[in-house]
Amino acid sequence: MKTIMLASKRRQVISGLNKFLRDTFSLEKVASFADCLAMLRQKRHDICLLDLNLIVKTGQLPESTEITSKLQNIIEAAAEIPLVVLADANQLRTAVQAVKAGALDYLCHPIAKQEIDLVLHNLSERLAIRSELEYLRSHFWKAEAEDLVRTSSSTMRSVYESIEAVAPTKANILINGDTGTGKSLLAKLIHLHSNRATEAFVSVHCGSMPDSLVESELFGHEKGAFTGAERRKLGRFQVADGGTIFLDEVGTITPNAQIKLLQVLQEGSFTRVGGEQEISVDVRVIAASNEDLKKKAENGRFRKDLFYRLNVFPLELPELKNRRQDIPYLADHFLKKLNQKYGKDIKKVSANVLNAFQGYDWPGNIRELENLMERAYILETGKLLSSISFPTELMAITPQDSSPDQDLGDVTLAEVRKRAVEEVEYRYLAKILEEHKGRIESCAKHAGVTTRQFHNLLTKYGLKSKDYR
């Protein structure tokens, strides 16, 4: 049975819709804007019905800036979930704006049976199309990749559709995106879904190699080719023969290495450093850059002919702050990985944490999210990844639409009290560490405990005195 989230406080609306829908849909009711937003981000429902009265304050004009902003937040959070707005006669303008912005349809209050039947028919068609698309996608993506390709971002949907088209081919690919946006992960996805999936995937971080060793690492060297070359070395291209090589930060390689790379792309062959024998390889090249490689080529800092050889099929990865609707998916994926790695069996990330994530700018992108979650996972003692395990400065960034007690319904009173005490203790310790510039004896005296007890508290909360000196 399909599930509908009904966001309304009006008894008349709730009872009317319950009467019309109870035989064909399962209804879950929420009575606040914040709860509606939080539930949408959990992606648990097939449909959302939003009563506009939930976001209209008494005496407020229906088309006010605040309402427009709240509606936009709901529409973005709904993403692939069909959204229907319920409007009074004086709210029709807002309802039409909602449909133009991405809502599927609107209903007028009081609701007529014929009207709701028509909307439900449209919903059924949309759900059928979505199911067909999901079926087709599931037959392309392998089981181990299904978590990674979940998205509510139109930009990322385009990226994944492009991968479906290009992965089975031999085309070279250039992935552009800021540091930490997941370029390496995308390259592995492409290889996994290519015809070379059973062959080697060789990853090379070009930016981390000394200039003098780039050619040797990529193409190998003969014994005695240079000081320290005591034996023949196979290059990464030869190791990747038959498979895929991923060249991260390709824009950093030396001019000489660029010439050899161009030769491999054009002719499928190269010579080792200090060697004369031409070696043929069949390697698919996926390159990545966190800077504008085209601009570098135009400025003469990267070979133009090499750029065009690499840029056969470009892919652009957005920053995490531009795909915030995917944060719950990514957090869920990382939590599963952490449970496999550490075995704590933490069930989920709290709604408060997810709300704080939505308000943060993520300068380190997906990599920063993964690192923050691993640190919090190590510190967490319960079955819920809660705000107490994350840095206070991150948890202090709370969007206006958040609700401080959204995740409390799943825990006992004892757990609520424990969390409250821990959060206050954490903030208290951080504050006195800052005031006393990390001096343990001074902090312990201020707190009225022994230095040993204070050390134990710092260990418990993952705080380090040196960070405050």
Image (cartoon, grey):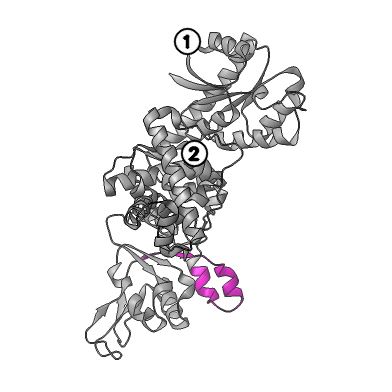
Membership of 292 in magenta stretch: yes
What type is the residue that disc 2 sits on?
Answer: Asn
Q: Which residues are magenta?
A: 284-309
Membership of 384 in magenta stretch: no
Quarter of the figure that contains the N terminus: top left
x, y percentage for residue 326? 49, 43
Instruction: Out of 3 and 155, give the one closest to the viewer.
Output: 3
Say which element carries label 1.
Answer: loop
Image position of 402 with respect to 48: above or below: below
Judge left or right: residue 113 versus residue 214.
Answer: right
Which residue bears the numbered disc 2?
352
Nearer-N-terminus badge (2/1): 1
Instruction: Out of 451 and 26, give the one closest to the viewer.
Output: 451
What type is the residue that disc 1 sits on?
Answer: Asp
Image position of 345 with respect to 32: above or below: below
x, y percentage for residue 207? 43, 73
Which residue bears the numbered disc 1?
23
